[in-house]
Structure formats: structure tokens, C-alpha cells
Image (spheres, rainbow, N blue to C red):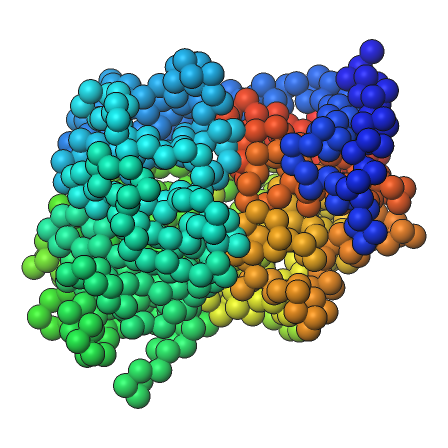
Amino acid sequence: MTKSKIASTVLPAVLAAGAVADVGEEDPWLWLEDVGGEAPLAWVAERNARTVDAYGESDAFAASRDRFKAILDSDERIPYVSKLGDGWYNFWRDGEHPRGLWRRTTLEEYRKESPAWETVLDVDALAAAEDENWVWKGAECRRPDFRRCLVLLSRGGADAVVVREFDLVEKTFVEDGFSLPEAKSGVDWAGPDTIFVGTDFGPGSMTESGYPRIAKIWQRGTPLEEAAVLFEGSAEDVSVSAYAHLGEYPRAFVRRGLDFWNSETYLRRDGELVRIDAPTSANVSVFRERLFLRLTQDWTVDGATHAAGSFLAADLEAFLAGDRALETLFAPTPTVSLEGVALTRNHVILTLLDNVAYRLEVLTPGADGWRRRGLPAGDGFESTYAVAVDRETSDAFFLHVNGYLTPPTLAHGVLGGAADGATAAAEVPVEVLKTTPALFDAQGLQVTQHFAVSADGTRVPYFEVRRPGDEGPGPTLLYGYGGFEISLTPGYQALTGAGWLEAGGAYAVANIRGGGEYGPDWHRAALKENRPLAYQDFIAVAEDLVRREVTTPRQLGVMGGSNGGLLMGNMLTMRPDLFGAVVAQVPLFDMRRYHQLLAGASWMAEYGDPDIPEEWAFLEGFSPYHNVDPEGSYPPVLVTTSTRDDRVHPGHARKMVAKMTALGHGVDYYENVEGGHAGAADNAQSAFMWALAYEFLWRRLGAENETPR
């Protein structure tokens, strides 16, 4: 008997037992929001078994899963490193270490083809010894000695973590060291024997978004209950955190997140908190003697208006004293936006997007102001960005280059000192440290950029990867996100290449409003009541692919996750005629209750507040859960999520699938028991989930709905 048959024999009784008390009149599927409840988990098991029976038993699925895992485990991947003191640290997962190794080497060793690594922490061994499903979430290490770290471990990949102090010399956890139980905590070192901590201190200590409301300072050897309060926010805030710069310019800060896009930053000085009087919408950072402001809205100060998207610098002490002399390091244009900033000891490296194509600039302060020069970047549509190696002590940087068809390359360079600001870009020495060989066959494939025209006349860029010699329309996968000022830029997607492009599919990525491809204004254009503009943009790209005969509606599949899953839900309900298959991963669907589920309240600045009637009036229009038409005709849908996702509640996915199924609409569903918001906790789970998605797509979009592989 198959798993699905076993589940179907016990499910009705379990559902009946769980449904009597929990079903609400307005939402009959509310009971599925009980993440670990017996009835919901039985429902999940039954749906999972059906989906595995349908897609996970074929030879094609097994071949994809095994190949994907081999790619994810490959020793030929670049082991990216971060410098902590004299060590170069890497976190590595492979077939022998699915949970991962935290390890270190030297720069001299790292330059070698096969470096010698010293294991610092074996997460697999730790998980086995403690009978826990630990997932690595990083470490906060103490400057300037880098002897101790606060290691963050998650159960099953959730955002909530356990914090434990670790000794990098002894390579062991510190007995009676700093430790915190599982919570959505924020920690940082405040000194050799002191940390800043925000965590679940008990009832009333967390915000409505589920993050710390209180920041405290905790001394070694004292109970957490005796930690001194630094700052208390309100329950309506998103979060409160404290952090420090321990080095040449020691400072401590408190950040109060008012909503997702607005915050206050305070400098702790002489036991008091002094607010840095910048716009709450600006991103505030301090390094050495300077204050840096990245604007997300226009700011008029001292008679001058600085446009949204600008990057400004000021002398910190002068700014605190009331001086508003600001230096503009970057000002946006209609096509050029600031994608990222890397600060080295004496320089600022800007990563710019020019119509979603990358270029880099180096800025160096001098007696006559800031000098500007270029830095070599990748060719064509390749992502190129710089990361400081150790900004406190050097001007070294890493240069990352990759593209849809360009395997990743990691280079290392050192910028000239403060007096060398005029050095030409070509003279900056860059050493290639690591390259990744091709992980899929890209022969004949080409990357092109196109522009669709949205319903309101806005030009919307999108990338396309396909063989230009292909005749006639064929299976095409369109990916989108469109939210939270996140840009979708070219990147090497080995699983997409191996699972889709190699087999003859075309791939497209839509740079719709809501993202950051053209800066904050591109994002803000699709906030709240204007959210449908992002959906109109995506529809315009899809229609353009059909118009250009790249594909047909029956052969056009779409995919997106998280906010992109909300996008997929709206494509399903708004234009079911335009798509042949829809894949929604860890999605939002219920916009009436999203703010009551896990971290949802933190996104009201992005979407709106459904408890305000005027805002629910527009939210309802893009709430997929409320727009399923009982009489509608929908394309095949695959919805995936994670039981351990404590950011986007799995109830969104569960309820949508249950409702569609009850209305007679076909929909496939799989819920991974681990993985958090990433959807998978290790490479084996990732391989399974992606093989499932591509098997579904090929079954639905291939010729005569048969897999053409």
C-alpha cells in the first residue's frame, strides 16, 4: 500500500476530530494554521504522499534529484571565506557533511587548488551528539581578538535560534558561557565580557511581529534576568536591537525598527542614548569618523533636496552637533541606481545598476573632496560586486563575478591607500583566487535583455536565456519577485541550467516594480494600494514573451517564492488564461490574516493593514485566498512550503490548497518538515524540492504534456 493510501484511510477521522472546534464561519480552513497540530499534520502527510506518488517516483525525477544533489555537494564549488583575525573561515556542506563544517585556513593555503582546512565545528557531529536537527545560522565573533564567538543554531532551519558562546582557540563551546534558549534573538559583543542582547525575556518582551522589543546589556557571570535595559520599544514596532563597533573607533548603537522601512538609530555615549537625527526612512551607518546615509525618500535639508536613492556622507561629530554639511557620493538617474556599498579602511566601493547592468566605482576622500574612478567589472549581463575583506584594518576586497551562463569567479584585490585616490582602475591589481567550472551545458545558450510595456506605459526590463536558433515557441519558465526593494540580477543558477535549460527550456526573469532595479522609487511605486502595478508588470512580460513567439500560454510556466509566491497567487487568480503551470514556493496567500501570522505584522508598511477598512479594500484585491473563483478554470499549480518556516506561516499555503481542492480545482502540494523560510535544511532536501518543481513543470509544459527529456 502506498503512503497516500495509508494516509487516506486515517485522515477523515483525524480531520473530523480536529475540525469540530477549530473551523470558523468566515474561514473554514483556519484549523490548518495550527502548525504542529495532529489534524493539520495528517492533512500535510496525505497531500505530500499524493504529490510524491505523482511526481517523485519517475526515473526522470530520480535522475534530476541525484544530479542536483551532486551539484550542490560538488567539491568544485567555490568555498567562500570571511576573514576573522588571522583566519579565513568557511562554512561548507557536502555529501559527507549535510549539516556542515565550520572550518578555517590561511590565505596562502586558500590560494591553492586544494587548501588544507582545519575543522572548527562539525555541525553534523554536534547534531548527532545532542540528538538535534541543527542548522547553521552563523556566528558573531568578538573584535579585536576574535577569540570568542556567539554561534547561532536553528532547529530545522527556522529563524529562531539557540545562541551559545564558542572558543575559536579551544574549538569548543564555553562552559558557563553566554547562552540563550531558542528565540528570534539578536546578539552582539559589547566588550570582552559583555554582550548586547534582544530576545524573548518573557511575556510582553516581543513585538507583534515576533521580534525583540527590548535591548539589554548582559555581563558575563550574571543571570540574564539581571541584564540592564538599554532601550524599550513598543509592541507595534518591528524590532529593537543593539550592536557595537569594537576597534579603532569604539561605539555602541541601538536601532529601533518602527516599521519595515522606517527606523531610529541611537548612539550610546556616556551611558546615554543620542539619536542620530536622520530621516527615519534612511539607512544609517557609521564607519570611522563618518556617518553614511542611504536615502529611500527625498530629503530636503538646509535648502537642498537630496533625491531618493542618494548616498550621502558627513562628519559624524559635526552632524551630531547640528552641522548638515553633506557630501553626495551617489545621486540616482532614471536608469542608474545604487545596488550596494562596500567600505574599506580608506575607500568606498559602489556597486551600480545601469538598466540592470553592473558597474563599479571607487571613491576616495581627499583634501579636494572625493575622487572617483572605475573598477573592472564583468562583461555583459554579469553580476559583479565587491565585498570588503576587513574594513577595519585594510583596503583589501573580494570581487564576485557570475552570470546566468557564467560560473562564479572570486578575485582578491587591494586598493591604494588614502593618498592614492587617482590610481586608474586598470592599475588596481586583482588576483583570481577561485573559479567554478561549468556545472551545466550552456552551449548555444544566449542571454538577452528585453523591455515590455506595462498597462500604464512603464517600460519593464526582463532577462531571457535561450538558444537563439530555436524555431517556434517552446516551454518557458518566467521567474519574478517584485517586492521589498530586492533586485533580481543575473546569477549562475546551476540547478535551473541542469534541470531546465539543458533540456531545451527557455528561462526569463522579470524586473518588475516593487524590486530595487531602479532604486527606491521603483520599489515605492508598488507599495500598498499600488501593489497591482507589480502584477501588471509581470503580466506585461508574460504577454511580451508570447508576442515575441518565445512561448505560448500553454507552454509558459511561472515561479516565485515568499513575496514572489504572493505574485504567483495573483497570476493564478488574475490571469489563469496566460499560464500553463504555476509554482508557488513558501508563499503568502491570505492577505486578510497575514499580519497575525508569525512575522507578518512587520510587512504592513509594504502591503497595508487589513484591519483598516480603507486598506483592506485594496488588499482584498490582491489576496489570492479571497479571489479563487469557484467557477474559474485554473492552470496546474504546485505549492510548496516548510513546516519550520517561522517567517511566512505555512498556513498560507495549506489553506489555499485546501480551499482550491474543496472547490474542485486541481492543485499539488508538498510541505517539507524542515528548512525554515529557505524551504530546505540541507542539500539533499534542496535537491528533492527542486527536482519536484522541475518534474512538475516538464510534465505540465512539455509537448503534449509529456516530459521531453
- Relative horizontal placement of residue 337, taking residue 563 as reference (left or right): left
Residue 56's image quarter? Answer: top right
Would residue 703 be seen by someone viewing this image from the given angle? no
Residue 343, percent from left and from top: 24, 54
Instruction: Residue at 32% x, 45% y: name it.
Output: 197
Residue 618, percent from left and from top: 70, 68
Residue 54's image quarter? Answer: top right
Instruction: Residue at 23% x, 50% y: name it.
Output: 244
The residue most toward the right is: 631
- Relative horizontal placement of residue 212, taking residue 531 as reference (left or right): left
Q: Nearer the viewer, residue 69 or 256?
A: 256
Q: Is residue 353 above or below residue 638?
A: below
Residue 26, percent from left and from top: 81, 54
Q: Is residue 404 above or below residue 523?
A: above
Q: Nearer the viewer, residue 250 or 89?
A: 250
Residue 292's image quarter? Answer: bottom left
The residue most toward the top is: 1
Q: Is residue 676 above or below residue 571?
A: above
Instruction: Residue at 20% x, 79% y: name it.
Output: 322
**Image quarter of the N terminus:** top right
Residue 416, percent from left and from top: 12, 52
Instruction: Residue at 18% x, 31% y: name it.
Output: 147
**Number of numbered discs visible in the structure rendering:** 0
Would residue 42 be seen by someone viewing this image from the given angle? yes
